[in-house]
Amino acid sequence: MSERVRTEGLPSDRCLVARLNRGDKHALAVIYDRYARRAFSLAYAICRDREFALDIVQEVFLALWKDPSRYDPRLAPFSAWLLMVVHHKAVDVVRREDAWQRRQVQASGSCSRAADECAIDSVLAGRVRAALQSLPEQQRDTLALAYYAGYTQREIAGATGVPLGTVKSRTVSGMARLRVLLARESADRGRSGGPGEGV
């Protein structure tokens, strides 16, 4: 799922990014063709809304065109970096939507059962995303690639240039830390009564 997926004879990601830095629009088109579908799949997996996902992909590629120097090839393969940018953008969008939906539910004062269940799902998903963001960056990025982008551990190793054993270790330690954070957050909410009581 990394540069290895390119077909024979096509330029490497590093070559394309170098051309992009020189203002080559064709290089952007090739990068878009290569990664737009995966970027959309990741954005959609996070926000579950086609229009939002399309907007996220457009924003990410537009930002890449405006400032390709944001990518530092010394830090990560291009594919991993691009998907992380998509992931962060999608999480930001979902946070804004979650906040908006909570305000709407509070303003309405009453909801149908289906709307209540949707709101609960949204809050639970928001808690998971918030806990994920508090993990160390390497664990967070590994889990995001695995559970939002659907990468296997072997594919994550290939995309990030990290040994497979390290990816496995980060996945296990990240999931353990995530469980602790969610349990702690749930206990804190239980002691405080949690928001929404009496609604």
Image (cartoon, rainbow, N blue to C red):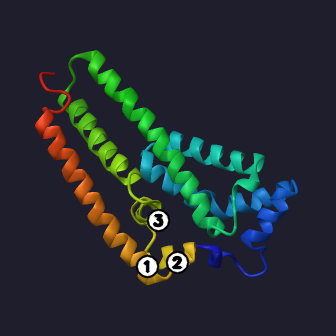
Residue shown at 38%/57% (left/top)? 135
In the displayed structure, does residue 171 sit left or right of residue 141?
left
Amino acid type at image mark 1: Thr
The numbered dot on residue 166 is 1
Residue type beneath disc 2: Val
The quadrant in which residue 119 appears is top left
- Is residue 119 shown left or right of residue 134? left
Q: Which residue is drawn at 46% across and 45% down?
A: 91
Which mark is drawn over residue 162? 2
Q: Is residue 81 above or below residue 193?
A: below
Q: Position of 131 compared to 28: left or right?
A: left
Which label number is shown at residue 138?
3
Mark 1 nearby-residue class (10 Å; few <14, some 14–19, many ≥20): few
The quadrant of the image that shows the C terminus is top left
Element assignment for label 1: helix
Residue 76's spot in the image, x, y percent?
A: 62, 68
